[in-house]
Image: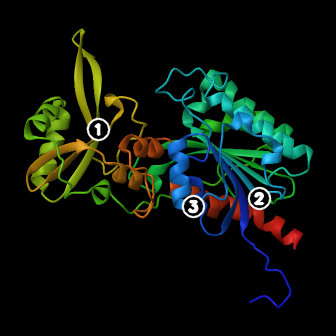
């Protein structure tokens, strides 16, 4: 207990969370971090954020309308930004950062520049997006972000991290980290991601190599499935899906059935061209990992669970709770009651244990030197 009359100092790291969604970055940072400010525009995601973390830190508004006066006076240790990926994703039209949604990055950066003019720029900046950002507009979009960060006085590093190292979901994402001059990036001992070599060479002395996570996943897809859930597909629907599989995949499925026990796979309906005509296929994987979660923008984007148990095959769509588990959300995290809203929250989010790893392996070591100097 602090002596009488002496204020208690909160020694937690502080952060700003832009494009906050349901607060997955906040959850990943954990109790060693204190949120100063969070922002999102999606009403249902904001409702989930308030349900899980309270209303005190969240500003529900378009980022285009925010001004520096809306941000806290205290300098933050970290600004996190998972800006929209729709114009950068390989699954989309790839209009790039000049398009409306992914172009919202520049409204985030406008606020960072405003903080810089008042000597309040965060010590660290972390930006998360799809790996397609590396090749968007031939790499020019990624280079633009790096140049803005370097011109603002940050040393920069980046790494593609797949959530499969932590959860049973293949979800490669690009993480860009900017480190200010009053922190100690020498605490990092990373190895360069070969996909980033050309960008690192261009950045020169401003580039830092981020560490890579060692594989640590200890959970299989079958372990996140609600096996007792009632609304599995009818036998006819499952039979139709299995009939859409290639012979190679069907043989793999037969092997799993013969092996016994509970096994789970995940797949999507795909349109393929064979012998000059389009053929609909159900393409599944059985390596204990689901494919990348997407937002529910149509039936073709919904991932299908295929389960083997006691010599029988069952199929159905993933539930919102199963999707949340694939994102590393705990079961006590309160999801939106609307199924579509819950799936959108998960599909748009950042994988919680990846953020936790970054906090442990990158953010805390870099900030430790700054905290000692300020003490």
Q: Residues within 10 Å of mark 2 (few under 14, many from 20)?
A: many
Residue 234 in percent (x, y) is at 11, 41
Q: Is residue 140 above or below residue 313?
A: above
Which sits in the foreground, 187 or 55?
55
Q: Secondary structure beneath disc 3? A: helix
Q: Confirm whether residue 126 shows in the render.
A: yes
Q: Earlier in the sequence, mark 3 or mark 1?
A: 3
Q: Cα distance, mark 3 to mark 2?
A: 20 Å
Residue 323 in percent (x, y) is at 38, 49
Q: Is residue 77 above or below residue 139?
A: below
Quadrant location of the N terminus? Answer: bottom right
Residue 362 in percent (x, y) is at 67, 58
State which mark lies toward you, 1 or 2: 2
Residue drawn at 85 percent across, 85 percent down:
6
Q: Secondary structure beneath disc 2? A: loop
Q: Cα distance, mark 1 to mark 2?
A: 40 Å
Does residue 62 appear left or right of residue 173 in this picture?
right
Q: Confirm whether residue 170 shows in the render.
A: no
Looking at the image, what colour scheme do you see?
rainbow
Query: Which residue is identified by label 2?
Result: 77
Residue 267: assigned label: 1
Query: Which residue is identified by label 3?
Result: 53
Q: Residues within 10 Å of mark 3 (few under 14, many from 20)?
A: some
């Amino acid at each position: 207990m602090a002596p009488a009359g002496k204020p208690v100092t909160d020694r937690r790291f502080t952060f700003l969370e832009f494009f906050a969604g349901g607060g997955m970055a906040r959850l990943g940072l954990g109790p060693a971090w204190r949120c100063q400010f969070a922002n999102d525009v999606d009403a249902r995601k904001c409702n989930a954020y308030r349900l899980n973390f309270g209303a005190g830190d969240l500003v529900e508004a378009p980022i285009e309308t925010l001004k520096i006066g809306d941000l806290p006076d205290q300098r933050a240790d970290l600004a996190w930004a998972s800006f929209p990926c729709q114009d950068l994703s390989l699954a989309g039209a790839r209009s790039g950062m000049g398009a409306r949604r992914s172009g919202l990055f520049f409204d985030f950066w406008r606020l960072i520049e405003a903080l810089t003019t008042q000597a309040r720029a965060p010590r660290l900046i972390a930006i998360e997006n799809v790996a397609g950002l590396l090749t968007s507009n031939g790499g020019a979009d990624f280079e633009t972000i790096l140049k803005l960060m370097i011109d603002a006085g940050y040393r920069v590093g980046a790494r593609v991290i797949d959530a499969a190292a932590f959860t049973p979901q293949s979800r490669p994402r690009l993480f860009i980290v900017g480190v200010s001059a009053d922190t100690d990036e020498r605490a990092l001992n990373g190895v360069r991601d070969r996909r980033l070599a050309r960008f690192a060479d261009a950045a020169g002395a401003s580039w830092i190599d981020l560490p890579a996570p060692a594989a640590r996943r200890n959970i299989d897809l079958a372990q996140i499935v609600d096996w007792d859930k009632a609304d599995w597909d009818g036998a006819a629907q499952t039979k139709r899906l299995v009939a859409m599989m290639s012979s190679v995949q069907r043989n793999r499925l037969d092997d799993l059935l013969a092996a016994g026990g509970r096994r789970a796979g995940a797949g999507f309906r795909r349109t393929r061209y064979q012998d000059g005509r389009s053929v609909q296929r159900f393409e599944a994987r059985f390596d204990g990992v689901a494919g990348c979660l997407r937002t529910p923008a149509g039936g073709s984007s919904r991932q299908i669970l295929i389960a083997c148990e006691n010599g029988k095959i069952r199929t159905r769509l993933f539930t919102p709770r199963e999707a949340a588990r694939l994102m590393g959300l705990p079961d006590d995290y309160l999801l939106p009651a609307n199924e579509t809203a819950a799936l959108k929250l998960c599909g748009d989010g950042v994988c919680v244990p990846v953020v936790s790893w970054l906090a442990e392996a990158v953010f805390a070591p870099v900030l430790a030197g700054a905290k000692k100097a300020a003490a």
